[in-house]
Image (cartoon, grey):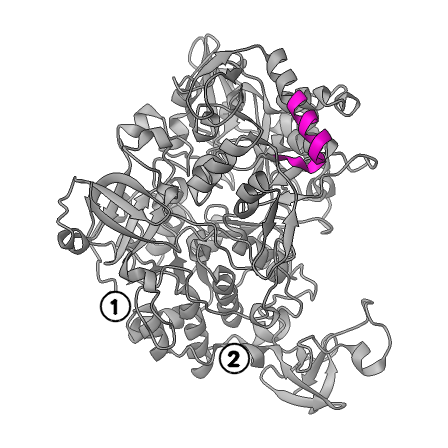
Amino acid sequence: MEKESTNIFQRKLDRRKFLKGSAATAVVVGAGIALPGGAMKTLIPVEAKAATKAAKGERVVNNICQGSCYGHCPMHAIVRDGKLVRTRAINLKKTEVADYSRICSKGTSWPQYVYAHSRIKHPYKRVGKRGSGKWEQISWDEAIKTVTENFKKVQAQYGKSSVTMCYEGGILAPSLLGPYTRMMNLIEASHFTRTDDFAFTAYCMNLVTGASYAYGNDFRSQDVRGAKNIVLMGVNVPETAPQSYQFIADAVDNGAKLIVIDPNFNTIAAKAKVYAPIRPATDGVLCMAMINYIEQHKLTNETYLRKWTVAPFLVKEKDGLYLRKSDLTGKGAGTPEDDFVVWDSNKGKYGYSKEVANPEIRGTYEIKGMKVNTAYRLLLNRIEPFTVKRASKICDLPASVIEEIAQACAQNPTEIIPGVSIDHYRGGYGTVMALGALQMVTGNLPFTTNLASVSVGWPVAGFYPEEQKHPVSTKEVTPFMLKDLVEKGKHELEGGHVVEMPIKAIALFGGNPAASLPDHQNTIAALKKADFVVSSSIEWDDKSIYSDIVLPASTQFEQDGLLDTSIYLLYAEKAIEPLFDSKPDWQIAKLIAEGMGQEKYFENFDGQTALDMAIKASPAAQGMGITLDKVKQAGIIQFPSVRANQFFTVTGRAQFYDENPKPNKDFGQKIDVEKLRLPYFDVPFEAWTETIDEYKKNPLADKYPLVYITGSRRFRTHAAFGYQKVLRELESEPRVRINPKDAKARGIKEGDLVKLYNDRGHVVARAIFHPGIRPGVVDMDRGWQTDQYVSGHYNNLTHLKFDPGTVNDCFYDVLCEMEKA
């Protein structure tokens, strides 16, 4: 008999009535990886090439959804009389990527975006007070002259890095980031880098793949469909990626157990066999407790640990470094022959990892006077305090549920799929390290998903490989230091180190940091104080409001582009001419570079140059002989499933132990090296509302007792699609989901306007009752622009605090109070 569901909110819904989406982890190939020759397969979509498939008077071209998510769904753009009239999913017929023949509601709304009233139609110059919304239409010549004269002025007085540029996020085509990178390097401006999900990125770069990380939406369907169990941690798949939830739904149809771990009961939780309403910020504790349980019940994947992870590598107690052959012989340090020392279980003595077939993974030894432990022993020592019983208190979950999830994770194959929300707290890096260790202990950490995938995305090199002699921008600005660098020219880090770099001019291309960065008012204060601000965008948004010059950018349908997933590379053909007075991103970058005296580097440079450069800068594309002409001819190039039986790390193995941890962004801040070597748990900066063992309640919780989460929504991606009329019919105003118990305690009725606030600021939103919201938690919409609120802004409540070891935005590590507005 089937075991009774432990989903305390389980509802009987027909699977096929449930909107489909997707989520999983995927890695993107990095530099220096050898690829099999001739591994490319091309697909020519029938509908894209057959004129008979188009209605009379219509033209059909390939494009791709660039909606700021990782779905990158291929779609057709339908053009009639030179106008974009609709979009639709490309029918890929019976191909390996046929599963991706679908787009979500955001993808179908693109025509409204292209012709929206909110589009910036011409260059504008501010004529009133910054932020007042008073503008004068000007020519492109005047706009570029104003921009470059201001850049030259501040650079002459304060140095090259006093101009900082951000071109990340939003719906800017990744293949067109190259021209901005090129221009930024040439004028030696500093780079303003967003740091929202960097805990995941740092973990994968250092400990797993040696490559970038894409989470949530980009994976091969057979991985999920063939799983025995699917464990989702902090990711609401049907909301964040509704176009391919089908893979998880199919897996459930095939008998997979779906387990959802999330503080709030949401759309995906309604389909789970097991739902675990975890206390916010404690996912890492749960992972460590499950490792303890798996170890105690002899469920570890011993073969995987010995062969593919650093588990058997011996670590010196005196300095925390791996014991290497050179430590014993005095020769070969730093060479490929300098192997890692392990303990041979069969012979009862030490040996080397490349020679020993059966190394010990749990031992403690003394070798030539040096005390050593296996890396796995150090992991077990670190997680020992986090028993199932203790985790039950910390995570606020029944011990039986923790044990059931641990048993599922220990089975193979199990897909353990995280969302970025689990890293949005202090200690987020420790959480993702614990998650990775759980995947390694169970043998469910996948190898590099697809070596044959090609990254033409983020960030694209701004130069061809053969271009050697050119200026390079080396200085970096992050959100937590921006205001101080603008106002004082320096920022003091915790520990006393001072970053000195005056910022006087800010250039924002594509994304919308004025809305999406934490501590909204801090960002706005920096924009108000800067000597000069220029922005380019498709539509008016929060960053436009505080700009001196606003430039109109073209949409993806008004310029050619390239986009990739781990599955395919698609050529997005220009469907219509640039509307109004807008220009493609490559041309905006070129005009600024020419105005700064760098015209020789942009001679004969156009949109095709940018795409060609993106492909030629990709080692994977070069390894497979992919060229721009081949992509254009094929329309879509499908990547075969070529897996790597290795990990691209300094040890060549998956690493739950980091012998030499460094911050992902090193500005001179002090770090706790010992802590960062293994998974760890830190109490959140704010979001800790009661005392549990030694983890004391944050005193701030007496004043602000609610944990403030800003969750994903189906009809927007961050700040994108915020003004779409058809989507706003379904989601007309900012809303906050609250538990009825919390509402009753504050005299709030469903539908009331409520004010959420803390010491940093406030936001007003419409209250929606949801019994699945964890008591003591509020789930606020994110992504709305300031003018769409009755008052305040959702990021007024968030902060810029970060863990020194991982410069990462702690969006959910926030407390607030709520009252009727």
Q: Quadrant of residue 701?
A: bottom left
One can see residue 612 in this view: yes
Q: Residues within 10 Å of mark 1 (few under 14, many from 20)?
A: few
- The reply to whether the magenta stretch includes residue 162 is yes
Q: Is residue 422 above or below residue 41?
A: below
Q: Amino acid at mark 1?
A: Glu
The residue tagged 2 is 380
Relative side of 559 to 785, left or right: right
Q: Position of residue 556 (x, y in %)?
A: 52, 25
Q: Quadrant of the image for the C terminus?
A: top left
The residue tagged 1 is 2
Viewer-side label of 2, 1: 2
Q: Residue at x 57, y 38 (%)?
A: 486
Q: Quadrant of residue 702?
A: bottom left
Q: Amino acid at mark 2?
A: Leu
Q: Residue at x 58, y 42 (%)?
A: 488
Q: Which residues are magenta?
A: 149-164
What element does badge 2 sit on? helix
Closer to us: 808 or 112: 808
Q: Residue at x 41, y 38 (%)?
A: 717
Closer to us: 182 or 377: 182
- The reply to whether the magenta stretch includes residue 69 is no
* C-beta proximity under 8 Å, tags 2 and 1: no
One can see residue 266 in this view: no
Total marks in image: 2
Outermost residue toward the front in this view: 488
Closer to us: 268 or 780: 780
Q: Position of residue 812 (x, y in %)?
A: 39, 53
Q: Is the magenta region chiefly helix, strand or loop?
A: helix
Q: Is residue 175 above or below residue 416?
A: above
Rounded to the nearest whole Å, what is the CA distance between mark 2 and mark 1? 34 Å
Q: Quadrant of the image for the N terminus?
A: bottom left
